Image (tube, rainbow, N blue to C red):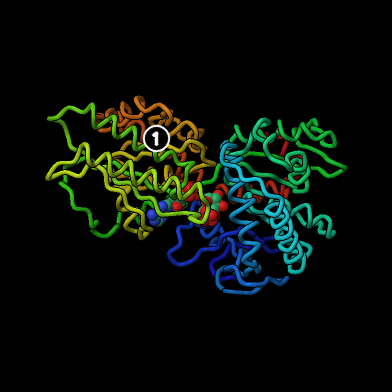
């Protein structure tokens, strides 16, 4: 048991995710969340090693500490098919409702299945009978199925960090008919929102071997499982403290000029082009004598070996140039587009300095940036969160300025409204948002999921509450 970790009565927690934290690489929400969680519980975190020429079975221990870390090997070929291919050119676009971006390749699926089988064998070797296995995200949808085939009886949970496809999305997936069976191999499937739970319930009904139980759970070939929503949170207090004690910001702009902030991985699901269009329309309509805001968009490159990501990067660069070309002046650059990873303390300080956050994805599992922004605010002079209806966070953060990111004019209007919002309204909205972020934080998420997975209160009884 590591120092400072909470006791675990149910054996060790084994978490598997494709990505492990690594130096400067933009990590995304999953890595931050799992790191914060395992720092509290201890356990073992398994993730992918850098690709090599050939790959062997087993795990390589890469770190021991509050939690242990180990990697599974991946050949370059597998990396191409499992990660760039099936995970990020099939499942990611499909689950984000972008069937137009799918790349169909049987080798991609074969590579995905092979890597999932290898990960299952590696877990089966290290898992003791009482251990809890918690699989993260879309890279490992088949691991539980392979674990069961290997005879592993442990509790197995899956948390999907991304949105769920609906029945018509699934028709575009060649393995669509098998997906319900892969999900059914877990004991608990955790999703971000109630909307996702409805979507997955519809998918499960497509499999005739799956039946709904009177208590709201599901059963397939005698194996019971549950599908519930557990909206992921952040370490809100920790982030608030970091924001309040942030170092001086290296921002060159007038102190009283409004700062609008966007922070996203450079991904087509984040609605960045639509966001730039909305800002462009706002600038075209703004009152010439009014405040001169700076919109700072931080968007580090992501998955750059996938064509759709190269396209969105080129598109954004063109839009950024055109917007400044049309609206900049000698003493004013309205749009600043930074494609780098930013130190977390500086990032927290930027959130706190920002008057407006633009979080406008076209589809997003949760979006932790929205929660980080709320946590970082000065409670006496809070900024305004503009949030897309299509972010999972919108189910909890109803008091944000909710927008449809496809509606350029509405986006421009929301920016104008946020910049001019009176203090009383900002305080009222912030007071409603704050408890959602601080009470339903990362610890709440972890405890809630593990309590249901381990069935402390009796799995059936716990499920019946939903
Ligand atoms: P996703 O998981 O799809 O990337 P989220 O909004 O849920 O989206 O999580 C993104 C995480 O990555 C947040 O914790 C955010 O603070 C962090 N992040 C995003 N961009 C940067 C950046 N340029 N520098 C540092 N951290 C970043
Ligand atoms: C999202 C996904 C994660 C992923 C992250 C970064 O948060 O849900 O599974 O790790 O994006 O993407 P990457 O492909 O760089 O790991």
Question: Residue visible at 18% across and 48% down?
Answer: 253
Residue 92 drawn at (x, y percent): 58, 45
Q: In the displayed structure, would residue 281 be above or below residue 65? A: above
Q: Give the residue at x 22% y 37%.
A: 326
**Label 1 within 8 A of ligand 1 by Cβ:** no
Residue 350 appears in the figure = yes
Splitting the image into 4 quarters, where does residue 128 fall?
bottom right
In the image, 149: left or right of 38?
right
* Image quarter hosting the N terminus: bottom right
Position of residue 118 relative to residue 217, above or below, is below
Q: Secondary structure at mark 1?
A: helix
The answer to whether 323 appears left or right of 454 in the picture is: left
Question: Image point 71% across, 30% down: which residue?
Answer: 202
Q: Position of residue 349 (x, y in %)?
A: 30, 53
Q: Quadrant of residue 165?
A: top right
Left or right, residue 444 beside residue 144 = left
Give neighbour class at mark 1: few <14, some 14-19, many 20+ (Cα, 10 Å).
Answer: some
> Which one is in front, 436 or 279?
279
Q: Nearer the viewer, residue 426 or 111?
A: 111
- Residue 280, horizontal then vertical, whole percent: 29, 34
- The residue positioned 23% from the left and 29% from the top of the image is 284
The residue to which callout 1 is attached is: 274
């Amino acid at each position: 048991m590591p120092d400072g970790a909470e006791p675990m009565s149910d054996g060790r927690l084994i978490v598997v995710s494709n990505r492990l934290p690594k130096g400067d690489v933009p990590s995304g929400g999953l890595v931050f969340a799992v790191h914060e969680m395992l720092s509290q519980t201890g356990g073992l975190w398994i993730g992918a090693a850098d690709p090599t020429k050939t790959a062997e079975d087993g795990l390589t221990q890469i770190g021991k500490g509050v939690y242990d870390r180990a990697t599974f090997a991946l050949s370059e070929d597998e990396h191409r098919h499992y990660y760039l291919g099936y995970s990020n050119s099939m499942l990611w676009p499909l689950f984000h409702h972008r069937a137009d971006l799918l790349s169909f390749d049987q080798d991609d699926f074969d590579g995905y299945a092979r890597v999932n089988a290898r990960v299952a064998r590696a877990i089966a070797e290290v898992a003791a009978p009482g251990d809890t296995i918690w699989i993260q995200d879309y890279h490992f949808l088949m691991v539980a199925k392979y674990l069961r085939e290997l005879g592993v009886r442990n509790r197995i949970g899956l948390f999907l960090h991304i949105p769920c496809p609906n029945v018509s999305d699934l028709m575009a997936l060649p393995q669509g008919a098998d997906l319900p069976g892969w999900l059914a191999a877990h004991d608990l499937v955790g999703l971000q929102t109630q909307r996702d739970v409805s979507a997955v319930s519809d998918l499960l009904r497509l499999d005739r071997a799956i039946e709904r139980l009177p208590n709201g759970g599901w059963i397939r070939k005698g194996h019971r499982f549950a599908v519930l929503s557990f909206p992921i949170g952040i370490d809100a207090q920790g982030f608030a403290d970091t924001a309040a004690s942030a170092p001086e910001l290296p921002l060159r702009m007038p102190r009283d000029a409004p700062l609008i902030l966007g922070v996203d991985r450079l991904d087509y699901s984040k609605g960045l082009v639509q966001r730039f269009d909305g800002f462009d329309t706002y600038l075209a309509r703004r009152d010439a004598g009014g405040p001169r805001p700076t919109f700072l968009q931080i968007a580090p490159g992501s998955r750059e070996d996938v064509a759709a990501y190269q396209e969105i990067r080129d598109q954004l660069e063109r839009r950024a140039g055109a917007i400044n070309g049309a609206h900049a002046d000698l003493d004013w650059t309205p749009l600043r587009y930074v494609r780098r990873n930013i130190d977390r303390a500086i990032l927290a300080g930027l959130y706190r300095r920002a008057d407006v956050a633009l979080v406008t994805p076209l589809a997003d599992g949760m979006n932790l940036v929205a929660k980080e922004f709320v946590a970082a605010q000065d409670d006496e002079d809070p900024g305004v969160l503009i949030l897309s209806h299509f972010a999972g966070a919108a189910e909890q953060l109803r008091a944000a300025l909710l927008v449809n990111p496809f509606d350029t004019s509405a986006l421009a209007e929301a920016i104008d409204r946020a910049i001019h919002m009176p203090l009383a309204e900002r305080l009222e909205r912030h007071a409603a948002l704050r408890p959602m972020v601080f009470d339903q934080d990362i610890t709440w998420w972890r405890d809630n999921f593990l309590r249901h997975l381990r069935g402390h209160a009796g799995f059936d009884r716990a499920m019946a509450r939903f």
